[in-house]
Structures are given as C-alpha cells and as structure tokens.
Image: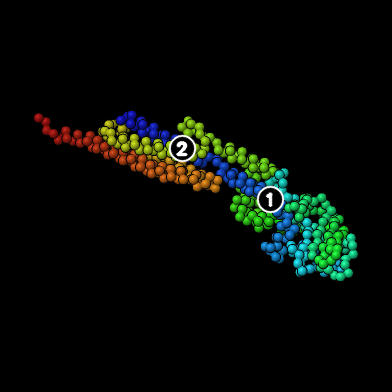
Amino acid sequence: MKEALDSVKHLHQFVIAASAAVLAFALSGSDTRVNEAIKELRALKAIDWTGYVPFVENEVYREAAKSAYSPQRAQLDAVRDSLGSLIDVPADPCFLPTGTCARVELPMATHLPDASTSLEGYESFLVSRPAVFWARFDRFSANRPFPRERARLSRMAVRPRLQGRFLHGGTDWYFDGDPPLAAVPGNVVLTLAGASPAVFEGNADVYVTLLADATPAHWLLQTQKELVGRSMLDPSASHFVSVRKYWNSVSAKPIDAAIGFLQDRADASRKQMSLFGLAMDADTVGILGPLSVAALLVFLLAHVRHLASLDPHDEFARTYPWICLSTDWLGIALTFSTVVLLPAAASAALVVRALANLREAGRASVIIPGAMTVVVVTLSILTFSAIRTLRRRLAALAAARSRERLSVPADDEASPFP
C-alpha cells in the first residue's frame, strides 16, 4: 500500500510541475507582434514609390475628388490670360489632347523614400504635401513668332532649371528635394495643333504650389487599399501600427535595418526552455508540453484506480500525508486546483498563445493545442472524480471503524459475568 501511495503522490507532483512549466511558457514574454511588425515593414518596402509621381503630375488624385484643386486647369487659365489673344487655349486639361482639351505637364518636387530613409522619414513623407511647378507668362518670350492664323494649344510642358530625375522611360520628370521658396528660372514648351512649326519654347518664371489632396497617404489609399489598415499602416495610411510598439528602438533606422532588428528580436523570442530537465525549442514545448501533462494525468488516473482496488482496511492509507486524501475543505480545494484547474489553464493558455500567432503560423498551429486542451480537461475531471471516490471510500471506512470501536465497550457492559 505504501508503495502505491508514494507513486500516486509523486505523479501528482509531476502533474503540478509539468502544468506549471507549460503555463509559465505560455504566459512568458513571447513577442507575438514582432512578426506583424516585420510584415508591415516588408509590405511598405515592396511599394514602388515612383508611381506616386504620375499620380500627382497627371492629377490622378482628382478622380476620387473632382472638386480638388487642379494646377493644370489653373495653368491653362494663366496661359489664356497672357496669350489668349494669339492662340486658342482649351479650358480643360486632359492626358490625351483632343479638340476641347489640352495636355498640361507640370512636374513636381518631393522626396521619394530610398534605402537610407528612416521610419520617421517614411511617416513624414506619407503626410508631406507635394509641390507642383507652374509658370507665369508675364515675361514669356517664344523662340519664334506665333502663326498668324490662330492655332489651338494641344500640349504644354513646364521645366524648371533644376537638376531633376526622369522616371518611367523618361516620361515623368520630378525634382528630388525640397521645393524652392521663390521663383526659379525655367522653360515652357507649347505645342500647337495644326501649326507649322508646331513647337514653341521660351523662358518663364517657375513657381510651386503645395497640394493638400495629393499626399503619398492619399496615393496609398487609392492604389494599396487592400493593404492599408490591414497588414500595412493605419486606416489613414500615415502611421505605422504594429511597428509602433518598437518605435523607440527602430524609428531612426532605415527600413532594412529596422527589419533586421525586429528579426533578431523574433529569433530571440523563440528561446529554449527546460521541460523535465530537457532543453527544447519553444515550438516543441508547445506540442510536447500538453502531451506530457495528458500522459501524466493518464498515469495518475490509472494509479488512483489501482489504489482504490487495494485493501481499504490498511490503516496506513488513512494516515498517509497526501493532500488529496484530506476531507478538509482546503484540501479538497487544493486537489481541484492542482488536478483540474492548473492543467486546464496551462493547456488553454497555449491555445491563446497559438491564436495570437494565428496570422503567422496558420490554423494548424491551433489544432494540436486545442485538441490537447479537450483531452487534458477530460482527463483532469476523470482523475479528480477517481480521487474523490477514493477519499470518500476511505472516509466511510474510517467512520465505520470508529463506530465499531464505540460499540465494543457497550457490548462488554451488557454481557453478564459468569
């Protein structure tokens, strides 16, 4: 009997130790958001920011808000005010010139992100207002006289005399830098439909206008709306979301360095822990931990049932120091806490941990912890019921033994002496 009680007591202690270890692992400082932060940065890094230039130059931003300010229309008005007596100037701008509209090429100034741009620089860029160059014609002088017969303006292009960059095969020009604070010299090229020669060029003062409705954030909302607010940036496309948790550490870093820093953090969070003296990876603990708890509960249940089948009249069983045999309310509470609550909480915590990493690890990472939680809870309840049955049986035998002892003196007094 003593050996059986020792085995049951030690198995109970193993269940407590294993459950506590699994619970500590599940509640440890697992950085569940670091992978989301890495994905957010990689999604932002994959964006081709050069597409933002034609978005502004061709006034694509006005497709979502026709009431937005149109620098191209304002430029046509300026041409009409100065040269309306010499040429016909359409009222509307368009990408492909027709009989009723003209193409207006107004370059822009902005700082497109590159490999050296910090995360703070990205956020500043996202809310920055682009500068659009336009020309005044107060001192415009074409390189040749306009034709005597009135011709229609079909295309015009403004080029400030700044060191700019050409994109998309040389079709888009922009100035990579801060816009000038005052007028800069520039050139204007006018193309007249039906005139020969058709191209007229001259000097002009070039200014800039800042646009509030064409920020990079607006461009992302129109071109990357399936990512914005989900796996990249907030719904306004102007601030990081998952990266914000690590902002003090990565805000000054370029995007590649920030990804490397967060990846190192993610690798460090996959630390090893010891289970029964064996060092193993965190992912392995997430599987073997609940399996070990379930296996220990099976052995504990089997030993308790075996103990209940032994001779219950052994006085040693009623005095053995195992808390689960106590009929006191505190002993019963401790038994329920260590046999049912602790193993169930440990397994449930692993499910919560898996759900937190669901987006990275997938649904398969939740199946094993979820299934093992059901198994552990079932085994815990069965084991607690078996212990309760054993405890009640021992208590009933103890009560019966006490009644027998009390009845012996009474029988002796009633017996007559010979």
Residue at 37% over, 33% down: 9
Dot 2, crowdedness within 10 Å: few (<14), some or many (≥20)?
some
Q: Is residue 62 left or right of residue 399?
A: right
Across and down, in percent, residue 251 comes to: 68, 44
Instruction: Residue 2: name its quadrant.
Output: top left
Is residue 361 visible to us here?
yes
Is residue 182 visible to us here?
no
**Could you say which is closer to the camera, residue 340 or residue 82?**
82
Task: Please state which amino acid type lies under the numbered disc 2.
Answer: Leu
Give the structural element (helix, strand or loop) at label 1: loop
Dot 1, crowdedness within 10 Å: few (<14), some or many (≥20)?
few
Q: Is residue 283 left or right of residue 248?
A: left
Residue at 87% over, 58% down: 203
**Of the residues tagged 1 and 2, which is closer to the observer?**
1
Q: Are marks 1 and 2 in contact (CB under 8 Å)?
A: no
Q: Is residue 287 above or below residue 187?
A: above
**Could you say which is closer to the camera, residue 128 or residue 50?**
50
Residue 288, disc = 2
**Split into 4 quadrants, where in the image is the N terminus?**
top left
Q: Is residue 193 above or below residue 305?
A: below
Q: Is residue 348 above or below residue 311?
A: below
Residue 218, disc = none
Across and down, in percent, residue 54 comes to: 73, 56
Task: Please state which amino acid type lies under the numbered disc 1.
Answer: Asp
Residue at 40% over, 43% down: 375
Across and down, in percent, residue 128 comes to: 72, 54
Query: Gap between marks 1 and 2, in whole Å?
Result: 45 Å
Give the structural element (helix, strand or loop) at label 2: helix
Q: Which comes before the other along the chain, label 1 or label 2?
A: 1
The residue under label 1 is 48
**Split into 4 quadrants, where in the image is the C terminus?**
top left
